[in-house]
Structure formats: structure tokens, C-alpha cells
Amino acid sequence: MMAFLNNLFGPLLGSSAMAFISKLNIDEGNLMSSIAIAMTAVSLCESYLAFRQRKVLAQEGEVPPELKNDMDKEKFEKSRQYALDKNMFGLVQAQFDLIINISTLMLKMHVLLWISSELILNKIGLPIDKYEINQTYVFVVLSSIVEVVLNTPFKLYSTFVIEEKHGFNNQTLGFFVKDEIKKFFLSQVITFPILSGIIFIIKAGGPYFAFYAWGFTTVVILVMMTIYPVYIAPLFDKYTSLPEGELRTEIEALAKKLDYPLTKLFVVEGSKRSAHSNAYLYGFFKNKRIVLFDTLIKGYKSADATEEDKKNGDDKDITAEEKKKLEEKQNAKKDRGCTTEEIVAVLGHELGHWKYSHMVKMLIITEVKILLFFILFSKVLNSKSLYRAFGFSKSQPAVIGLTVILGNILTPCKVVINLLMGCLSRHFEYQADYFATTLGYSKELGASLIKLHVDNLSFPFNDRWYSLYHFSHPTLIERLRTIAQYKTKKTD
């Protein structure tokens, strides 16, 4: 079986990738320039789309007819300003990222980090094993620290300037710092065994390591999909069972009607960090669960902090002044959220994704991409010229080939793949909307979509090319008009 797969995919991907480079006459000397040009070209295209979007944001002056009853002029202008602020922030961050990425590439900063990881191992007396696992892990930790240093200022500005300005941020600085520290250390703890397994397979797996690595990665993905919502997500947000009442009764009735094996129904206190709202489903086989953000439920009030919360320091991070400010925000948001009927319609849409097996299809596509990636990597791993071009003349670390070399070479391919995945995602959203309308929720679904967009200050107009490139969902107006068409066809 392995020989068959290798014969089928190996020559196609590996040789064609190397042949592609040679046909373009890209040698070790100009490969860096070619990658930098590709990065710049992608960035320029994205900036062009961002300016197209900015033009739409600035010029559209009237609330669309579909929203006349739900979005007044004041909310329309607020959503415009919010979108403009995020647009400019995105433009600035994109240019910063481009400068950092090209500088890292040209100055070969990854070589410096790899050498530094070796020096650190020598300093603390840990051996450099033949599988490079220890050095690889130190390299990843150093890279993560650099990434945190570079990204934290942007996260702070986004959270405490933009989101705060427009009434969405509910985090204190202490909560933010604690959250980021937890994320960093948890990611390192999770990364070590996964990375160790992949590196070991690459080094010891022989000619078919690509398939073994793919199998290992598949198992990791399935395990993480299982344990993340149960054990990891609760480390960051509080999950409680949805109280008995009309909403719970209606949701359980819908699940029973569709034979959805619902086992648990949670509310997550997303309001602790943001006023944005959402809902999602998760779980395998007969163990399905539904999670609603508390910000989605109109009039929902979370229980008082438990003693355990207090021990964890949730209350200690909030001063009296900050607590008063937070209470004022909560009072200003009393009208936000959806009614019971609207929430059930939203879940009808989410259950459409389950009914049409959208998550399974996306998982299969992801698995195919991972397999092709590892097969291509199996050829890159043996290319000394590529490693020399990236500054690694004495060694060929697997982690460098996986993250740095392939990550940079495949830049144009990733753009195309993301475009195709975006198109597929939008198609799935239309299908899920259609499913909700077949359940009789056309009116409620439209109302809930409007409510969610208005509550989240989503500007109702978008440049078509910008939305096609960036959005995983159709725009609000596109969805409302399509839902109306579904309703008309059903009536006919």
C-alpha cells in the first residue's frame, strides 16, 4: 500500500516541485530574492484589496433597504467607523509583517535562532541527540518568544484601543496578560510531544516517513479536536450548563427532531473578554455538544463568580473603577442578543453544517493537504541546495524544512488554496442557510443574522473582490437575499 501511494504521489509532487524551481532558473543566489518578490506581490495585492474596501467604507452613505428597520443612522455610522479603524489597523500590521518577514529571510535570522538553540543546550548541559528533538524544541521556544514580542503590541492596540473604543473589549490589562501567559505555556507543553513525534518519524521513518508522519498528524488532529473543548477551552473561559427554560427546551426539541445526538448544552462566558457573540457545535459520533456565547442570549445574566474563580484571581485583576466601568458597559448592552426563536434559527443553520457533513468534508480536504505537504517535504529534506540557500550549509534540520523552507516557497500556493477554501466555505454557508429555511426558520434566521451583524457593528457594504478574498462567509446582504429566494421557492 505504501509503495502504491509513493509511486502515485511522490514523482508527481516531489520531482515536479524541484523541476519547477530549475525551469525558472532559480539558483541558490537568487532564490531569496524570488521569495521576497513573491511575498511583496502578495502583500501589494492584499493592500490593493484593502484600499478597495476602504473606498467602499468611506463612500456608502445610506443604510441598505434590508436593514432599514434594524439599523438607524447612528449605528450605521458607528459600524462604518469601526470597519475603517480595523481596515487601517490591518494595513499597518500587514506592512509591518512584510518588513519583518523579508528581513528575517534576507538576514537569515532562522540560522541565528538555530545556532542559539545549540548554544543554550550546551549551556544547560543537555545533549544534542541524533534526532535533533532537543534542539528543535529550543528553536521553537525561541521562535515563539520572538513572535510574542513582535505581535503583543498589535494585540494590545487591537484590544485596548480599537475594541475598547467601539465598546467590545471587556478585558482588563491583568486579564489580558494572564490569558497570554497561559496561552504561551500551554502551547509549548502541547507542542513538545507533537513536534517530538513528527521529528522522530521524519528521522527514523525511512523512505515512507511522509505517510507515517501524515498518519501521526491525523491522530493528533482527532485527539486535539476531542480534548480541546473539554479540557483546554475551559482553562480560558467558564462553561456552564444552559439553565432549564424555554430556550433549552426549544433547542433540545430541535435536536430530537433532527436525530442530533445532543449530550450537553453549554453557555460560555465570552463576555468576560469581548461583547462579540457566536454559537458552535462540536463532538464525535453520539457525543455531540452545543455551545452558546452568553452575549448571544438576550437578557442573559451569568451567575456570580464562584469561590474557585476568586482563587484563580479573576476578581483580583479588576479594580473598583474598572468594575464600575464594566457594569456601565453591561447596562449599555441590555438590548444586545437574540430571542429564543432567533437562537434556535441560528442553531438550525449550525445543524445544517452537521446534516451536510461539512466538517467531515473540510477535515478530509485538510488531510489531503497535509499528506501532499509531507510528500513534498520528503523531497525538500534531501535538497542540500535549498538548505544552503536558506543559510544551512552544514546541517539540514527537519523543522527548518517544514516551517521555513516550505512555508516560504509555498507562499503563492497558499494564496490560491485559501481562495479555493474560501469559495467552498461560502458554498457551505449557503447550504446551511438553506437547511435552516427548510425547518421553517427563514424569517427568524434573517432576523438573527441582522441582529448579530448590528450588535457586532459589521458594516453592511463590502467590496466584492475584498470579500471574495478574505471572507469565509457570504456578506449579510447576499445571505438575506438568498434566504428570501429560498423562501419564495418554498412558497411556490
Image: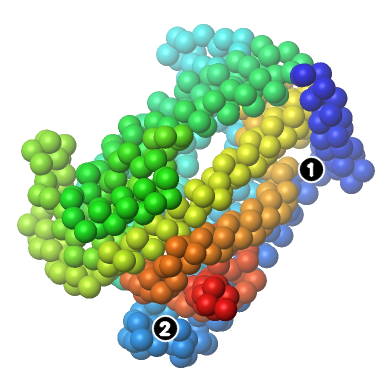
Residue at the image position 42 percent from the left and 13 percent from the top: 124
Q: Residue 114, position in %: x, y? A: 58, 26
Relative to 161, 328 lies left or right: left
Q: Are marks 1 and 2 in contact (CB under 8 Å)?
A: no
Residue 425 or residue 124, whichever sits in front: 425
Residue at the image position 22 percent from the left and 44 percent from the top: 240
Numbered-mark total:
2
Residue at the image position 46 percent from the left and 34 percent from the top: 285
Q: What colour scheme has been applied to the protein in the rendered image? A: rainbow
Relative to 295, 444 lies left or right: right
| Circle 2: residue type | Leu
* Residue reaching furthest to the bottom: 62
Q: Which mark is residue 67?
A: 2
| Quadrant in the picture for the N terminus | top right
Residue 350 or residue 58, whichever sits in front: 350
Residue 124 or residue 170, whichever sits in front: 170
Q: Alpha carbon of mark 1 to alpha carbon of mark 2: how far?
A: 51 Å
Residue 131, above or below 223: above
| Circle 1: residue type | Leu
Q: Residue 483, position in %: x, y? A: 52, 73
Residue 366 visible in image: no
Residue 196, above or below 404: above
Residue 261, above or below 479: above
Q: Which residue is mark 1?
A: 31
Residue 367 or residue 410, whichever sits in front: 367
Check disc 1: other Cα within 10 Å, few if <14, some if 14-19, many if 20+: some
